Amino acid sequence: MGWKMMNKQDRGFTLIELLIVIAIILVIAAIAIPNLLRSRIAANQASAVSSLRTLNTAEVTYATTYNVGYSAQLSYLGPPSPAGAAVNSTGAGIVDSVLAGTSNTSEKSGYQFTYSPGTIADGKVMNFGIRADPVSRGITGQNSYYVDESGVIRQNASGAQATAADSPLAG
């Protein structure tokens, strides 16, 4: 007789025990997921500020290297085209192609960067402004940022686009 009597220890989990485990997992997930989303937004915002610093430094480098003022387009800071061509004032190779984008916009880490060349005097772009706005406010980021030739990064947390009139970024 190959059959043996099954006692309680041999039967496995009951339906109630499985439901309790699932409920505990759901409670933990309900606590962890919003924290994960907030962490992702904070990381995207930190990346946007870092990218603005990089772009500001790239503009200063561009202006001193080519002696034509600041760039007329954001894409001028990127690699030359075609690939392997010598760097020049329309393909300076100072930032990567993602950050340089196309024309005057680029997108990175949930933020869209918009470049605005300023006044032109003697054929040179004398000033500029760069805005960083979340692609999807509340999901990819909360704050908007702005930097110009002064190098001061400004932020707007109210949901509007940041401008030169907003408060400087603390820290």
Image: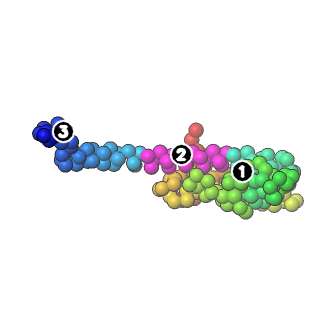
Secondary structure under badge 2? helix
If the image is split into quadrants, where does the N terminus sit? top left
Residue drawn 41% across the image and 45% down it: 35
Q: Residues within 10 Å of mark 2 (few under 14, many from 20)?
A: some
Secondary structure under badge 1? loop
Residue drawn 73% across the image and 63% down it: 103
Measure how far apart labels 2 and 3 are at the Cα level.
49 Å
> Amino acid type of disc 2?
Ala
Q: Residue furthest front?
A: 1
Asked whether 96 or 7 is in front, the reply is 7
Tell me, for residue 126, which label it has, or none.
Answer: none
> Amino acid type of disc 1?
Asp
Q: Is residue 169 left or right of residue 6?
A: right
If the image is split into quadrants, where does the C terminus sit? top right
Where residue 7 sits in the image (x, y, percent)?
13, 38
Tell me, for residue 43, which label it has, or none.
Answer: 2
Which numbered disc flags the more N-terminal residue, 2 or 1? 2
The image quarter in which residue 163 lies: bottom right
Q: Is residue 63 left or right of residue 5?
A: right
Which numbered disc flags the more N-terminal residue, 3 or 1? 3
Residue with the mark numbered 3: 10
Residue with the mark numbered 1: 96
What segment carries the magenta color?
36-53
Measure how far apart labels 2 and 1 are at the Cα level.
20 Å
> Amino acid type of disc 3?
Asp
